Image (cartoon, rainbow, N blue to C red):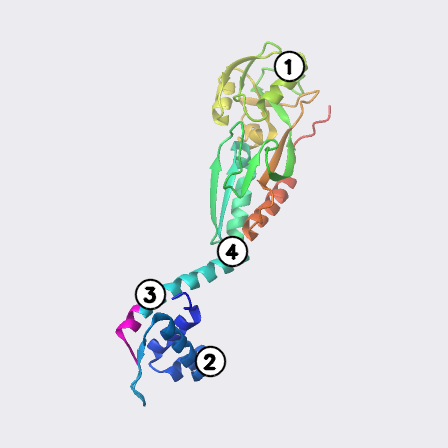
């Protein structure tokens, strides 16, 4: 049975549908003797005849064994056709891509990425997962956005520097840049101590300020709601500020920091040595293009 080939099954199916070896050969683009040889090889593999051959103009008929072989053979041919189609689609860029992301990228970079991928490859299957663990892993993901470098056997592409800004209720600080030192003792709402947050808070401490953290949450909308309510100000990266459209809210003011804090760094990661599908390779290209089109404020002091 291991000697059965797809071409043998294709020849059998064509004969069953056309009724004669000659018409099947014409349909497949073979000579009649070639089709006969393929059926003979198939019959040797399955151990018996698959067609009754009455001779003359009468059509051939399937034997009981032939009916079993053809029934299963058509299923095999269908799977082979589906496999060939899937490979063709993969090479053309369609298929599935799994992307890990986080809030800021989900709001600002990912919508353009997803829209362009779907426009270019309407049949693609894009699967997203959003989390911000302390120790992220690529795992089965094709691509992972993260604010920092992921450890392990990975490759990465830096997308942009994401400067920190001060978001405060209107009137809390005078218009214009604010020194981090002015945050000493000030009530602040903040993200949990994961990802780049500890590094940012350490930089604030080095500037001589010890803000009073009165609330922590990983949800940007909740943080900004607390700022509007007067609970405290917040230090947020530019991507988060842009994604929440803070500039359009007259209850909030965005202040540059002078001197500036070290910017958060946004990277796109993937497993080292992994051969990208055309879809994943295109996703990297688009992410780089989208990030290059963004214009974070200058961090010069």
Q: Earlier in the sequence, mark 4 or mark 2?
A: 2
From the viewer's perspective, is the residue at label 1 or at label 4 nearer?
4
Callout 4 secondary element: helix
**Separation of residues labelled 1 and 4 (CA atoms):** 50 Å
**Residue beneath disc 2:** 30
Residue 230 seen in render: no
**Separation of residues labelled 1 and 2 (CA atoms):** 80 Å
**Residue beneath disc 3:** 72
Q: Earlier in the sequence, mark 4 or mark 3?
A: 3
**Separation of residues labelled 3 and 1 (CA atoms):** 71 Å
Q: Residue at x 55, y 28 (%)?
A: 246
Q: Residue at x 52, y 47 (%)?
A: 115
Q: Residue at x 41, y 72 (%)?
A: 8
Q: Quarter holding the C terminus?
A: top right
From the viewer's perspective, is the residue at label 4 or at label 3 nearer?
3
Q: Earlier in the sequence, mark 3 or mark 2?
A: 2
In percent of width and height, residue 83 lies at: 45, 60
Residue furthest top in the image: 185
């Amino acid at each position: 049975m291991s000697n059965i080939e797809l071409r043998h099954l294709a020849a059998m199916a064509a004969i069953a549908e056309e009724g004669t070896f000659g018409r099947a050969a014409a349909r497949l683009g073979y000579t009649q003797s070639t089709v006969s040889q393929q059926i003979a090889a198939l019959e040797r593999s399955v151990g018996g005849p698959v067609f009754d051959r009455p001779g003359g103009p009468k059509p051939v008929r399937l034997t009981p064994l032939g009916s079993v072989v053809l029934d299963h053979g058509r299923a095999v041919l269908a799977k082979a056709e589906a496999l060939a189609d899937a490979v063709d689609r993969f090479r053309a860029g369609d298929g599935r891509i799994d992307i890990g992301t986080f809030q800021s990228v989900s709001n600002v970079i990912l919508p353009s990425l997803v829209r362009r991928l779907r426009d270019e490859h309407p049949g693609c299957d894009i699967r997203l997962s959003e989390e911000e663990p302390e120790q992220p892993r690529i795992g089965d993901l094709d691509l992972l956005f993260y604010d920092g470098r992921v450890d392990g056997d990975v490759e990465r592409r830096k997308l942009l520097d994401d400067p920190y800004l001060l978001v405060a209720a209107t009137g809390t600080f005078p218009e214009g840049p604010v020194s981090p030192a002015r945050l000493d003792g000030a009530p602040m709402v903040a993200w949990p101590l994961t990802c780049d947050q500890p590094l940012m808070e350490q930089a604030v401490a080095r500037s001589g300020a010890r803000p009073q953290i009165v609330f922590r949450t990983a949800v940007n909308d909740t943080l900004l709601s607390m700022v509007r309510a007067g609970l405290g100000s917040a230090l947020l990266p530019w991507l988060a500020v842009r994604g929440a459209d803070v500039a359009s809210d007259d209850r909030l003011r965005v202040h540059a920091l002078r001197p500036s804090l070290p910017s958060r760094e946004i990277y796109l990661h993937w497993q080292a040595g992994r051969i990208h599908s055309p879809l994943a390779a295109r996703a990297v290209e688009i992410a780089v293009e989208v990030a290059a089109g963004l214009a974070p404020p200058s961090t010069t002091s």
